[in-house]
Image (tube, grey):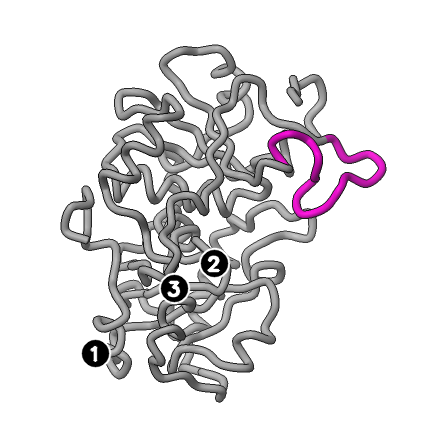
Amino acid sequence: MSQYADPSVLVDTQWLVNHLNDPNVRIIEVDMSPEPYKNAHIPGAVFWNIFTDLLLPDLKMNLDAIAFEKLMARSGITNDTTVIAYGSYPGTGAWIFWLLKVFGHENIRVLNGGYQKWKSESRPLATELSTFAYTDYRARGIDADLRVLHNEVQASIGRSDRVLLDARTLQEYCGEWFFDQPPQEGQLTGHIPGAAHLEHILTLNEDGTFKSFNDLKNLYESKGITVEKEVFPYCAIGGRSGYTWFVLKYLLGYPNVRNYDGSWNEWSRLPDVAIER
């Protein structure tokens, strides 16, 4: 991991084994359903539900500071706690890294390989629910430098110094799917005109760990996503693009990356925006 631009943002499974009982470390498991967590999770991990804890009913990212403070407080997290994030879905931990950075949390790390690697190595698992005493958590104001809004995305179409990067599946990019299924009535599919396409899971090895610095660099550069350009990743609801932001900024050291967290969920519903298929 030492070859990455900032290897300190990752921890491996052995590091986490060594810190399972560290009172200043809080492990967060993030998923779309609580069932996998209830069946087996990393000991001491707190569960966050994507739909009820992180998203609003319209699937926009919940960036309300008070809601975020309550989530952190009930998870037993203080402003000084080191948070280790993972999920059963590839890249979830890196999305949580982006989210916590948006609200100014300093000590956040991603479990390299996530639950997949942890389980494959027969690391300890627990079924009992993890609960901690409430804390008094205080979020900072939203860091606007980590986000890009739709009007700037629209103004970036056709600019050679900026890359709009679609991190969704090929089916979504080509307009066959809206999120994870064929579109229903009123749902527009496709991609932002001129957007490069690189599905986020292509950055991972088979064991769920991140590919090497050189492999990642070659992968992105093959799509014209080079370090001197400003990059605006997007996906469906901002999670996979938050993951892509993490890879580009912290693993590869790209200086100018901002996540379009509104993503396709917002873009496809805006009036008078261009859509390409």
Q: Which residue is mark 3?
A: 114
State how far apart marks 2 and 3 are (Cα).
23 Å
Write down the quadrant of residue 20 in the picture.
Answer: bottom left
Q: Which residue is mark 2?
A: 68
Boundaries of the magenta span: 172-188
> Which residue is drawn at the image coordinates 61% and 27% (left, top)?
191
Query: Disc 2 marks which amino acid?
Result: Phe
Front position in the image: 213 or 159: 213
Where's residue 215, x and y in %? 28, 40
* Mark 1 in CB contact with mark 2 (< 8 angstroms): no
State how far apart marks 1 and 3 are (Cα).
16 Å
Where's residue 187, x and y in %? 77, 35
Query: Disc 3 marks which amino acid?
Result: Gly
Q: Earlier in the sequence, mark 1 or mark 3?
A: 1
Q: Residues within 10 Å of mark 3 (few under 14, many from 20)?
A: many
Where's residue 3, x and y in %? 15, 46
Q: Residues within 10 Å of mark 1 (few under 14, many from 20)?
A: few
> Which residue is drawn at the image coordinates 28% and 73% (left, top)?
25
- In the drawing, does residue 177 fall left or right of residue 126? right
Residue 174 on the magenta span: yes
Q: Which residue is mark 1?
A: 18
Q: Earlier in the sequence, mark 1 or mark 2?
A: 1
Residue 124 on the magenta span: no
Query: Disc 1 marks which amino acid?
Result: Asn
Q: Earlier in the sequence, mark 2 or mark 3?
A: 2
